[in-house]
Image (cartoon, grey):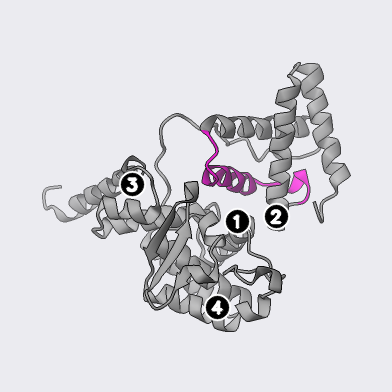
Amino acid sequence: MQGVNVNFVREHIDSFLNYLAVERGLSSNTLDAYFNDLTGLIEFLEDGGGPRRWADVGASDISAFVDDLDERGYARSTRARKIAALKSMFRFLREEGLVEDNPTEALRSPRSGRTLPKALSIEQIDLMMAAIYEDETPEGIRDAAMLEVLYAAGLRVSELVGLDIRDVDLEAGSIRCVGKGSKERVVPVHAQALESVNTYLDTVRPVYERQSNAQALFLNRNGRRLTRQGFWLRLKRIARAAGIPEDITPHTLRHSFATHMLRGGASLRHVQEMLGHASIATTQIYTHLTSEHVREEYDRAFPRA
């Protein structure tokens, strides 16, 4: 793990696992799983240049990691175990005086059934877009293209960073992406998003490009394909500049896309296809959000409401 004091981190993990073995008598299989869970968090944070010490890990870092687990399709039982490992580790670090705060205190294990996703308002989306277009640096131009595409097409962040140049059809106004289960879908994208992508392709990407990543669409300054964590960190900066709560994640933009499409009159079936949901039951969660919107409109418009 480049940039991370491996011995320092490993020492604390080993001390924690030894505590679990001696004090709680956990099996070697469980200890191995916890080790993998904790090193997975470290790699996630290091991947995008995040905190490099346990003491610097905040609640937003933990939330992003858990959101990434959900994005990658881990089973509920696996996510619950990983969350349990994080909570137990930080309790141990707190008791040992190695961290002052426990960033997992408000973290809850995944429940059966679905919770309503968060969605930004259209006004908040506009604020974020305005903020990013004010950044005329190469990274700002790239981020504008990524933000536009993420919201315009309702992509998962893994689908966004996995795009290749050939996946963008500027003439047809569409993007081809590969979702869960390696299923491909083609999603229409509006003109402003395509214009942002075209500007990035003309002015920024040729500067970032390296031969080894000739196909990747979105690159970092080192010429490598931008990672999920890398984009998440950029999104936090954009949200901060726009005055939006920084606990949003790339998945928030996907939720916002679905909600705004349905509120705008799109059919549930069409939104299902654009999101790449295998079952319409997965998409139906958004009908709760649009029902709330209908109620708000009713209470505001009906004279006896």
The correct choice, above or below, for 193 with respect to 244 in the image is below
For the residue marked with disc 2, what is the amino acid? Asp
- Residue flagged by tag 4: what amino acid is it? Tyr
Q: Nearer the viewer, residue 262 or 93?
A: 262
Give x and y (percent) for residue 62. 63, 44
The mark found on residue 200 in the picture is: 4
Secondary structure of the magenta portion, mostly? helix
Q: Find out whether residue 68 is within the magenta segment.
A: yes
Amino acid under disc 3? Tyr
State if disc 1 and disc 2 touch (CB < 8 Å).
Answer: yes
Give the magenta part as a residue range: 52-75
Q: Is residue 214 found inside the magenta-colored segment of the image?
A: no
User: Tag 1: Cα neighbours inside 10 Å, few (<14), some, or many (≥20)?
Assistant: many
Q: Residue furthest right?
A: 7
Given the image, on which type of amino acid does mark 1 rest? Arg
| 283 shown above or below 189 | above
Q: What is the distance, in whole Å, between disc 3 and disc 1 at their CAs? A: 24 Å
x, y percentage for residue 171?
39, 78
**Residue named by callout 2:** 47
